[in-house]
């Protein structure tokens, strides 16, 4: 049986070689950070490489949508702190009836959302129509359990919108963005929940006239509701 020979001292890398390799790795990591990560995530592009690769535009969309969503949430919480929930449509009342009864036996804090998550139907279908005035933004979310999937398709009529598809684990938790875009007339695909919570879309009309968004959803979710 043959074992590999132990390398001699001369074959081992010297301290200078190790330092040089470490320095090269640090420089490479810094280069990736400056040319790729910062432009794509934060729209910070000191070298101009990110804009050449169209990464800076991606970062601008992310930061703009995040800032707009946060500004709308703050405005909504300051102007309408006690806003009453919207009355459910007739076709939603029957599915929510069991949830309301069960809510009588659950702690009031977050009871509705927890029950909707626990009793989410195997599948449901909704069509939601939203009209956005110029500069207006709106957010709609689905209550979903981790791993649940929803087929969706939305279209913008009479214009285009900026959007961000994201999920929120719970009150006060940090949102996770799944996909975003600017100047879009519509998107379709499958929304997969990475965790229990609310998942959906934020749209902003940056045009000069009203835009009507039609959202169609089919899949495993407890409810669909307007957040702002």
Image: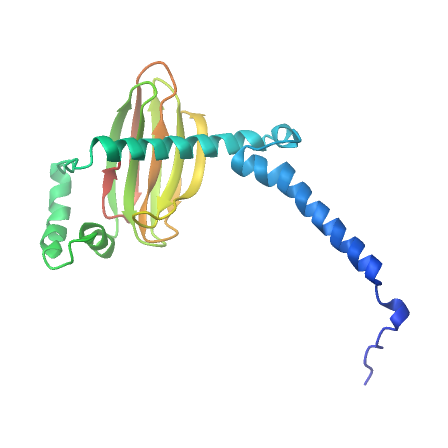
Whether residue 201 sits left or right of residue 98 in the image: it is: right
Q: Residue at 36% of width from left, 14% of height from top?
A: 208
Q: Considering the image in quadrants, where does the N terminus appear?
A: bottom right
Residue 187 seen in render: no
Residue plotted at (77% across, 54% down) = 21
Residue 218 drawn at (x, y percent): 29, 42
Q: Is residue 105 left or right of residue 143?
A: left
Q: Which residue is pictured at 20% across the width and 32% down the height?
A: 80
Task: Give the tally of numbered discs.
Answer: 0
**Residue 29 % position (x, y):** 67, 47
Of 20 and 122, the residue lying toward us = 20
* Residue appearing at x 23%, y 44% in the figure: 223
Left/right placement of residue 132 relative to residue 91 reads right
Residue 57 screen position, x and y as percent:
54, 29
* Residue farthest to the right, as pictured: 10
Which residue appears farthest toward the bottom when viewing the image? 1
Which quadrant of the view contains residue 191?
A: top left
> Can residue 217 be seen here?
yes
Instruction: Locate residue 53, reporting x and y percent.
Output: 63, 31
178 w.r.t. 115: above or below: above
Query: Dividing the image into 4 quarters, which one contains the C terminus?
Result: top left
Q: Nearer the viewer, residue 176 or 80?
A: 80
User: Residue lying farthest front?
Assistant: 78
- Picture layout, residue 102 above or below residue 92: below
State how the image is colored. Answer: rainbow
């Amino acid at each position: 049986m043959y074992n590999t020979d132990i390398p001699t001292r001369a074959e081992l890398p010297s301290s200078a070689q190790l330092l040089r390799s470490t320095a090269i790795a640090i420089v490479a990591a810094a280069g990736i950070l400056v040319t790729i990560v910062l432009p794509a995530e934060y729209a910070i592009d000191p070298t101009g490489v990110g804009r050449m690769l169209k990464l800076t535009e991606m970062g601008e969309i992310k930061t703009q949508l995040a800032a707009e969503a946060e500004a709308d949430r703050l405005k909504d919480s300051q102007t309408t702190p006690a806003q009453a929930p919207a009355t459910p449509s007739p076709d939603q009342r029957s599915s929510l009836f069991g949830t309301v009864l069960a809510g009588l036996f659950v702690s009031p804090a977050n009871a509705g959302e927890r029950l909707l998550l626990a009793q989410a139907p195997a599948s449901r279908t909704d069509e939601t129509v939203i009209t956005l005035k110029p500069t207006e933004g709106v957010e709609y979310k689905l209550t979903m359990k981790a791993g649940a999937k929803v087929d969706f398709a939305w279209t913008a009529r009479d214009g285009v919108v900026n959007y961000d598809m994201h999920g929120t684990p719970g009150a006060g938790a940090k949102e996770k963005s799944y996909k975003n875009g600017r100047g879009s007339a519509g998107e379709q695909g499958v929304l997969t929940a990475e965790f229990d919570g609310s998942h959906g879309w934020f749209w902003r009309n940056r045009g000069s006239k009203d835009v009507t968004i039609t959202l169609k959803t089919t899949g495993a979710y407890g409810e669909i509701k307007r957040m702002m």
